[in-house]
Image (spheres, rainbow, N blue to C red):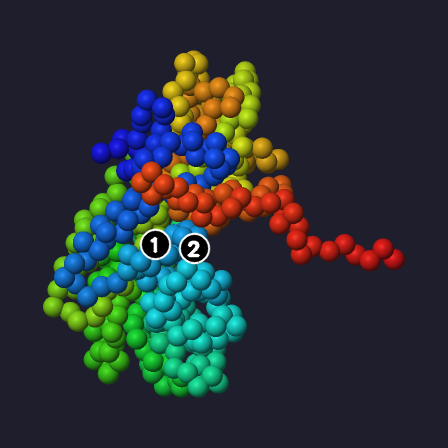
Amino acid sequence: MSTYPISTLHEEAAGLYLEGVSLATLAEQYGTPTYVYSREALTVAFNAYQAALKGHRARIFYAVKSNSNLAVLNLFSRLGAGFDIVSGGELARVLAAGGDAGVVVFSGVGKSEAEMRQALRAGIRCFNVESAAELNRLAAIASDMGKIAPIALRVNPDVDPKTHPYISTGLRSNKFGVAFDEALTLYRRAATLPGLRISGIACHIGSQLLDPAPIAEAADKILGLVDQLAGEGIPLDHIDLGGGLGIRYKDETPPTPAEYLAPLLARFAGRSEEISLEPGRSLIGNAGLLLTRIEYLKPGSEKNFAVVDAAMNDLARPALYDAFHEVVTVSRSDTATQRYEIVGPICESGDFLAHDRELAAAPGDLLALLSAGAYGMTMSSNYNTRPRAAEVMVDGTRTWLIREREQIADLYRGEHMMNAD
Ligand SMILES: *Cc1c(COP(=O)(O)O)cnc(C)c1O
């Protein structure tokens, strides 16, 4: 067992290795900052879900927004995953990665008419509808196209997932889903609309959940509603309980998929509906790290800064959520240990990657920010006209460049000056 949150990361005499590849060698080969992922770690994470669901009618829909690189999507597709998407762009990625539209579910509060048409043309498995207005729009578009849209209503079970307010989504007070009390009325209405086929029900209560209780509580509420619907002649074929299982960033002890799912699966004993799950973070979060190099050390009277070549545009979670990522040195150094603020070159005081970390490091040394596989690259930007990082997949002793580092000229391609008059 690795002592790191990333199970395939370990220390050798030559420094840190991800699977059979030296991170220092990777940095030489591909430069920094670079996101590095472990095929084995994501495979192990996926297989843990599969094993927990064995013997049940269930399917995993990988949440594409957590990491949408084509190579990642392709690996999950080959492992047997479906996909949870939130935009037409993500649908295009899934298809480009060899994924099958027939195992795609489409979530999100703002699906455009064009996105609905694209998804209907592709033949996705289900639209997770989040409002009455969206239901009407989808019925009209499907009818116009002579198609039938399979739907689930995303309901808001109003349970408190006890997580960060920005990543809790199942409370009455937020923008996601249909209020639980309105769901029955909306299902009745859906049953009368043309162009729709009622297929299931969905919820997603939040992210980085470290306790199985809230999702089990949500399932109880939803199963009650499902039974009520069946009594009214609206039987459902699948129940989608969303994603949200947390991972270890620091000292959290998240349940395993088996522990997380046990109370849920107990509630499904003797039922016929398929269970759908939409994990993202717990499949890819601890399969990735961000490799960065120290540009400067800046000692100060109150704080010492380590200025690195990655920044908040590469990894936004610390600036956005005050999130913690473990920072480790890639090679042992004999310099003295100091406490550092790990900051990037961006002109914002909020541009930090980590606070108050004890490191023995010198300029030019490499650092790895761990647990960066999910919501890392997908939330990156070009702020300060910084090209986005490269992405590399490690597979045993082999490495694959799965996304080239952006070129500066890419960043203003498509921009135009006004005419000179
Ligand atoms: C973001 C999201 C997920 C994935 O959440 P994780 O915390 O990454 O598992 C699943 N379903 C929906 C609808 C989402 O918005």
- What residue does disc 1 label? 75
Image quadrant in which you'd find residue 317: top left
On the image, the x and y values in percent for residue 100 come to: 36, 67
Does label 1 or label 2 sit earlier along the sequence? 2
Is 331 rendered above or below residue 253? above
The amino acid on which the numbered mark 2 sits, given as a three-letter code, is: Leu
Residue 201, horizontal then vertical, whole percent: 30, 69
Q: Which residue is mark 2?
A: 70
Residue sitting farthest toward the front? 398
Mark 2 vs ligand 1: CB under 8 Å?
no
- Residue at 69%, 54% (x, y): give it: 415
The tag on residue 363 is: none
Depth check, front residue: 291 or 129: 291
Q: Position of residue 200 (x, y in %)?
A: 29, 72
Q: Residue 102: in sight, yes or no?
A: yes
State the residue in front, 369 or 38. Answer: 38
Residue 199, horizontal then vertical, whole percent: 30, 75
Residue that appears at 48% across and 48% down: 403
Instruction: Tell me the quarter of the image containing the N terminus.
Output: top left
